[in-house]
Amino acid sequence: MAARKLIPVGKPKALLISAMRIPPKGRDFLSYDVLFFETYWYKQFIAHHPCAIHAFGINTNIMKPSVSPVEKIYDYIMVCDFRNSSKRHNNFLDKKGVKIALGGVGDVALAYCEDENVSFSPLIKACTLSRLFDDPRSNVQDDILKSEKIIAAASDEEFAVIDKLCQRFETSLEIGLHYRLWRGLMLLERKRYSEARREFQIVRSRLYHPRIDEYLLQSEIFVKTA
């Protein structure tokens, strides 16, 4: 099966190459018995391996235009995980034309056209702004403080939803960090100061911004004086 002699490594070893990841080089390249790749176009980069197999992922060849004309519905399509704010989702808003955004926010996915009459609660708007405000170099802005005051004043029903999300993503700080921030704000508003301080301490260990320090300081003062 192999056109070239592989470097013996004991037990058979395979490598699943993700998307456009650069393949290993030199001896590391031949130390794998099998290379699995996602899309057919990628094979050119690993063709000199004796055993490269297309075994998972999406075959993008089927996405080529058909012979007959295809009507264009959207000018821009954005597909991503909205929890990853480093993707600069706000730049998508500046695009002109018909747009659609598809992706996940925790366990929720939203997709709607601009001309649809969609409304959101003040809490949803506030959480969205809080989640997307992630520049540690920025000074605290009035908008973010106003939004997080809305979060703090959430109803008991809304608090219960945030609390469940925190429990669900408790071991995943990358996903659940803002859930903990929001729960901390709600706990502070409910005068559960020790619990709020714990949430802010966890958030502060991973997310630096002056407002987080301020929330943590408030909770510590209330714990000592309550």
Image (tube, rainbow, N blue to C red):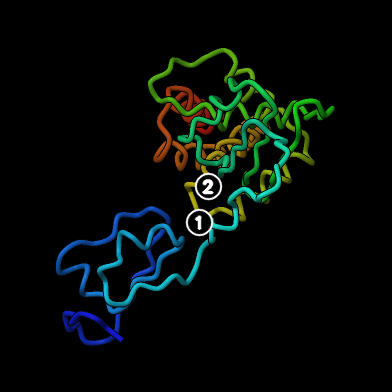
Looking at the image, which residue sits at the far right? 117
Which residue does the numbered mark 1 point to in the structure image? 171
Residue 179's disc is none
Q: Disc 1, disc 2: CB below 8 Å?
A: no
Which residue does the numbered mark 2 point to in the structure image? 175
Q: Quadrant of the N terminus?
A: bottom left
The residue that appears at 27% across and 76% down in the rendered structure is 50
Q: Residue 120, how many percent across, how many down? A: 78, 29
Quadrant for residue 8, please give it: bottom left
Q: Nearer the viewer, residue 199 or 22?
A: 22
The 10 Å Cα crowd at callout 1, few under 14, some 14 to 19, many 20 or more, is few
Q: Amino acid at mark 2?
A: Ile
Q: Is residue 64 above or below residue 178?
A: below
Q: Amino acid at mark 1?
A: Thr
Instruction: Give how far apart the Cα atoms at labels 1 and 2 are.
Output: 9 Å
Horizontal side, residue 107 vs residue 52: left or right: right
The 10 Å Cα crowd at callout 2, few under 14, some 14 to 19, many 20 or more, is some
Q: Is residue 86 above or below residue 33?
A: above
Horizontal side, residue 69 vs residue 138: left or right: right
Q: Nearer the viewer, residue 191 or 198?
A: 198
Q: Residue 144, how many percent across, how many down? A: 57, 20
The residue that appears at 65% across and 42% down in the rendered structure is 102
Q: Quadrant of the C terminus?
A: top right
The residue that appears at 73% across and 38% down in the rendered structure is 71
Callout 1 secondary element: loop
Question: Of the residues tagged 1 and 2, which is closer to the observer?
Answer: 2
Q: Is residue 203 above or below residue 58?
A: above
Q: Residue 110, how many percent across, how many down? A: 71, 41
Q: Nearer the viewer, residue 144 or 70?
A: 70
Q: Residue 164, how many percent across, how many down? A: 68, 51
The residue that appears at 68% across and 35% down in the rendered structure is 100
